[in-house]
Amino acid sequence: MVFSMCPRSKHYPVVIKMTAIVFVLFIFLLFISSCNHESNGKLVNSSTVHKIPEWFKDGKFGMFIHWGPYSVLGGEWNGKKLKQGENAEWIMNTFQIPVNEYRKIAKTFNPTGFNARQWVRLAKQTGMKYLVITSKHHDGFAMYHSHVSDYNIVDYTPFKRDPLKEIAEACAEEGIKFCVYYSHREDWEQPYAYGNTWDFDSSQTNLDVMDHPELFRKYLDRKVIPQLKELLTGYGPVGLVWFDRGMYTQEQGMEFVNLVHSLQPECLVNGRVGHYDKELLGDYQSMTDNGMPIGGIEEYWETPQTLNDTWGYSKNDQHWKRPEDIIKRLVSIVSNGGNYLLNIGPTGEGIIPDSSLSILAEVGKWMQKNSESIYGASPSPFPYEMPWGYCTRKDNLLYLHIFNWPKDGTIKLKGLNNKIKRSYMLVKPSEELSFNKQDGWLIRLPKEAVDPVNSVLVVETDGEPDVDPMIVKQLKNEPVLLDYLSASTHGRAVKRFNRKGETGNFHISKMQGPDDYIEWHVEVTTPGIYKVDITYAAIPGWENADYLVDSGKEKIKASVKSTTGWYEYKTERIGEFTLKKTGEYVFRIYPGHETDHYLMYFNSIKLVPAP
Ligand code: GLC
């Protein structure tokens, strides 16, 4: 920088050379740092997680669209029907429809009822801020004009139009972020991709792709990468790319993260891009399908959810959620710090089913009056669940979402140490409600709920809400469990989601030094000696780092043992505490010294009364 400011100096050529060297070095370092995400347990992912943009953080609510040749079948093929709960976009796999048969179905795909503007307006009227549409699902069919293969909606069908282009344009006009889903590992049309074991010669598909990475590589190089390039260069700004079903290796996952960011630096990558059992790649975490975390995850997350029980259109699945269920899910998700990506499955004619339209219309009506409590809101500051509903927050405003109108006409807020300045129903800001303090704040509600589903009460506090921490109450003589739900995290420690297992799991990690600690407040009712069992996972390379478990009176020093793999939790007894008196104790765990890797994936500590 300094050099290039004096271009006319006589050292000009030297300056250029030096600048070039510095630049090359910079690129090299950038490359090294982005490759180093996993090796030897050092430097973990954080370089890949870039800033979450406002549209995503504040928007909270997005529309997912699953649409493709499977929509023509609507869950039925050759006289066979999918069972309730089976995903209609999986029909090719479920009935093992040969590629050639499925191609014939794709040939008939002619969604003349499709109207991009209507779909985008539907998202907008429902209060959604972004839209994610399947550009290629597992069946391998491109829903846009791809030049990589003619197996796409423009070249392969009588429809001849590019719906993604039309949707991208409508999104730009309506102020909705345009985003694409892309199935990168799974492709049932491709012999070298993952998934189609019924069609292709087993020497190609059934083989363990890890044993023949060069074949899988061919698929990536010939189809996936060129198609992603098309999507990221031909459709204007893309808000995010929604990858699915994970990858074989972290390196491959990283390749996609880098590809997206290099073509569109602002574009987000969801958390399903990398290996499911390893450290998160991508910019935010994707919950499992329809996943509803009960505790506050402290990294940004999104949960993809269905309106009935399937993503793609099914004639037979009438198991629709009610509008009130959707509103409840939305509020619960936002109060836990996440985004709600809600799916619709249009038909093969391009029509959105009436039931979906009427559910979304109701949700839209609620959003129209109450979206202030959703957009830009941060999670509930309260560490406990509310009997009447959920809490979201914006600065000094608490939004109390009342789903169960209390019979005694009062809302009780425990553990809020601030003074309340004002309280009113969101839809009636001029009618102030009365409140007073007893062992908590009592706010007197209007006689009747102001909304049939969720009436939002606003409580304005004097300054940042200051809320008591959660207290874990010991049942007499029982063990005490200290887990992520009852913990508070400090420094770099964060509560996180991981995809290990069917339903995923939660842990606390990113602790790298003594100031990164996890804390619990515990009310001990039975004094005595307690054995201390800790459950955690640590990958090879993380062993021998010291950590301390502190009861406020005593400290146990222990060192990390590798547990063979990512999120392979093991339990170990590390010592004992003598808790002499009943009453409140503060327990903490933290690294003994600075490390260049995370201490562990912490799961829980159990205090077990000694016999
Ligand atoms: C699953 C399914 C897929 C669907 C996705 C949505 O991974 O395989 O069909 O698109 O979930 O979250």
Image (spheres, rainbow, N blue to C red):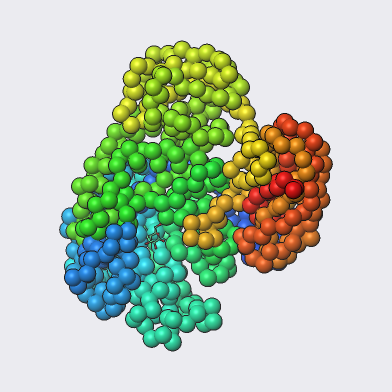
20 in relation to 376, above or below? below
Residue at the location (52% across, 24% down)? 413
Query: Eyeballing the image, is 156 above or below 493?
Result: below
Q: Is residue 193 visible?
A: yes
Corner quadrant of residue 564 = bottom right
Kindly identify the residue that appears in the image at 51 percent across and 30 percent down.
394
Q: Is residue 152 above or below residue 435?
A: below
Which residue is rendered at x = 56% and y = 70% of the image?
A: 249
Viewer can see residue 148:
no
Q: Residue 288: where, in percent of width, then height?
A: 46, 55
Ligand 1 shows up in which quadrant of the image? bottom left
Q: Position of residue 65 (x, y in %)?
A: 32, 54
Image location (x, y in percent) of residue 605: 68, 49
Q: Residue at x 78, y 44 (%)?
A: 529
Looking at the image, how many numbered discs can be counted on the residues? Answer: 0
- The answer to whether 560 appears left or right of 213 in the picture is right
